[in-house]
Amino acid sequence: MGISRIIVVAKEYPEHQRMLKLATHNAAHLLDTMEFHEDLRSALKPFPKSLEQLPERDVTAGLETVQEIS
């Protein structure tokens, strides 16, 4: 059990070397296959049920949160 995939939503691609330093040796491979998206809607595209069930206000709130963090 554990994380099998990382999906990042941000304005800029995260600093790969810094993340590698913080990752455990068991999780470093996930950074090589990490998915990067600039918006929440495109990040959720592989999960159509999520998009259908996610109210527009939550997508908007998610985008606002991403903008605040970035």
Image (spheres, rainbow, N blue to C red):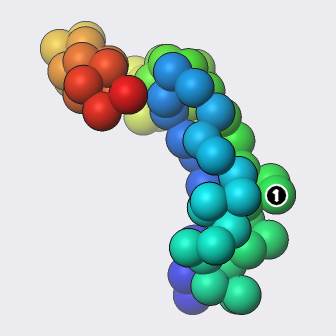
Give the x, y percent position of residue 42: 58, 20
Which residue occupies the foreground of this view, 7 or 14? 14
Where is 64 relative to 22, above or below?
Answer: above
Q: Quadrant of the N terminus?
A: bottom right
Say if 13 sits above or below 17 in the image.
above
Left or right side of 41 for 13: right
* Residue 39 placement, left or right of 55: right
Helix, strand or loop at mark 1: helix
> Residue drawn 56% across and 73% down?
22
Give the quadrant of residue 3: bottom right
User: Is 59 on the left-hand or right-hand side of 61?
Assistant: right
Question: Is 70 located above or below residue 19 in the figure?
Answer: above
Side (left or right) of 20 relative to 32: left
Q: Which residue is mark 1?
A: 32
Determine which quarter of the picture holds residue 43.
top right
| Callout count | 1
Quarter occupied by the C terminus: top left
Q: Quadrant of residue 24?
A: bottom right
Please name whichever residue, 61 or 69, is drawn nearer the observer in this view of the structure: 69
Q: Position of residue 4 (x, y in %)?
A: 66, 69
Q: Residues within 10 Å of mark 1 (few under 14, many from 20)?
A: few
Residue 50 coordinates in the image, percent (x, y): 42, 34
Does the rendering let one see residue 5? no
Q: Decide if residue 60 is in sight here.
A: yes
Q: Which residue appears at 68% of the width and 68% of the height?
A: 20
x, y (%) of residue 36?
A: 66, 34
Kind of residue at badge 1: Asp
